Amino acid sequence: MDLAWSIVLAFVTAYFVAAIFLFVCPLHENHSRKLKGNVRFGAHRGGAGERIENTMAAFDNAVEQGTTLLEIDVQETKDGVIVISHDNDMARVTGMKHPYKISDTLYQDLPDYNNVLPLDFMDARCNSCQEDLSFVKLEDLFVRHPDVIIHIDTKEGSPTLLQKVSDLIEKYDRYDNTVWGNMSEDANTKSYTLNNKVPMFMSIKKVALTYVTFYLGIIGFIPIKECMFDIPILRAFPEQRPGILTPSQSCLLTVVDFFMMNRLLFWHLKRRGIKVVVFVLNTKKGFERADYYNVDGIMTDYPSQLAEHYKGSETSETSQILQQ
């Protein structure tokens, strides 16, 4: 009996030592293609709070503010053109009646965006007087901003859409500054099978699995092929959209957020070469909270505000150094 307990104890000890070692010095480092540059400054849908989302005016404005990452979604038109749009149904962004889908419409027949659109992650609207409100081709964005990292959500994830996005990445040699993926693990599996040279962000299922393995203490044993870990800071949502949740819902959200925002997990992921990016933050308080967690990047609807935050942070850091 003593021998059996000794074997169990030795096994458990060896397991914990191995788990700690692999957490600190991961053998399963992410060896997939790395992104060139940093993802510190992300513009959600091109900065949907300052220009109409996903228009070229939005992308240009974000880049002028210093954006290093443009977050977009893509859809495929009836004639096979890959365009940038969060929704396949155009009712929300154009005012056209249901059903009016991009997938059922020729590119040349796509209407313009409305010049006033509500934000999803802020109790606010974007009112723009910009002239160009047309849908943007993914290829045109690649040509316009060749050096900016493009974060592509493949949305519908059809085989033809994935193939065409992959072909465009290949055509413009954007393997070092494009990351793609989908909320669906099935779609991500198809993307990886089609072209495993393109950096990928995690699906919802893979994000959940990452947390489970972390809290079980076995994350160091698990290989991870994705290079980006995108998560929301849940506590920011009721702050940005007051009244959207009941007190009990807000309390539950705070508890979940406590377990999600774990600096130790983020440290481990960085050790493996995986970027940690949070979304969608639109207030100074949100930006400061992200800084506290030492994430690699922030996505925002207001690139000018995030630019000001970073300038203020850099000025503060420089002052502290001079005072030492």
Image: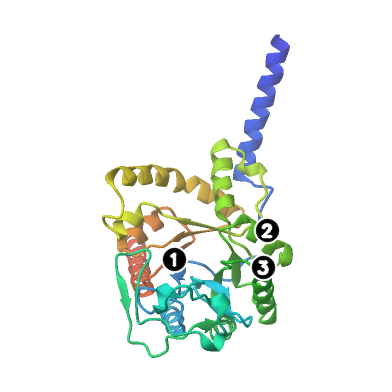
* In-image side of 96 versus 250 (left or right): right
Q: Where does residue 311 sit, x and y in percent of width and height?
A: 35, 71
* Above-or-below relation of 32 to 249: below
Specify few, some or many for label 3: CA neighbours under 10 Å numbering under 14, 14-19, or 20 or more: many
Q: Where does residue 163 sit, x and y in percent of width and height?
A: 69, 73
For this rendering, which residue is in front, 66 or 203?
203
At label 3, which amino acid type do we have?
Val
Specify few, some or many for label 1: CA neighbours under 10 Å numbering under 14, 14-19, or 20 or more: many
At label 1, which amino acid type do we have?
Met
User: Alpha carbon of mark 2 to alpha carbon of mark 3: how far?
Assistant: 12 Å
At label 2, which amino acid type do we have?
Thr
Q: Where does residue 60 sit, x and y in percent of width and height?
A: 45, 83
User: Alpha carbon of mark 1 to alpha carbon of mark 2: how far?
Assistant: 25 Å
Q: Which residue is mark 2?
A: 189
Residue at the image position 42 percent from the left and 44 percent from the top: 256
In the picture as drawn, the residue positioned furthest to the top comes out as 1
Q: Which residue is mark 3?
A: 198
Q: Where does residue 305 sit, x and y in percent of width and height?
A: 33, 71
Badge 2 element: helix
Tag 3 or tag 1, which sits nearer the N-term? 3
Tag 3 or tag 2, which sits nearer the N-term? 2
* In-image side of 150 versus 324 (left or right): right
Residue at the image position 40 percent from the left and 57 percent from the top: 290
* Above-or-below relation of 220 to 145: above
Tag 2 or tag 1, which sits nearer the N-term? 2
Specify few, some or many for label 2: CA neighbours under 10 Å numbering under 14, 14-19, or 20 or more: some
What number is the disc on residue 299? 1
For this rendering, which residue is in front, 320 or 171?
171
- Mark 1 or mark 2, whichever is nearer to me: 2
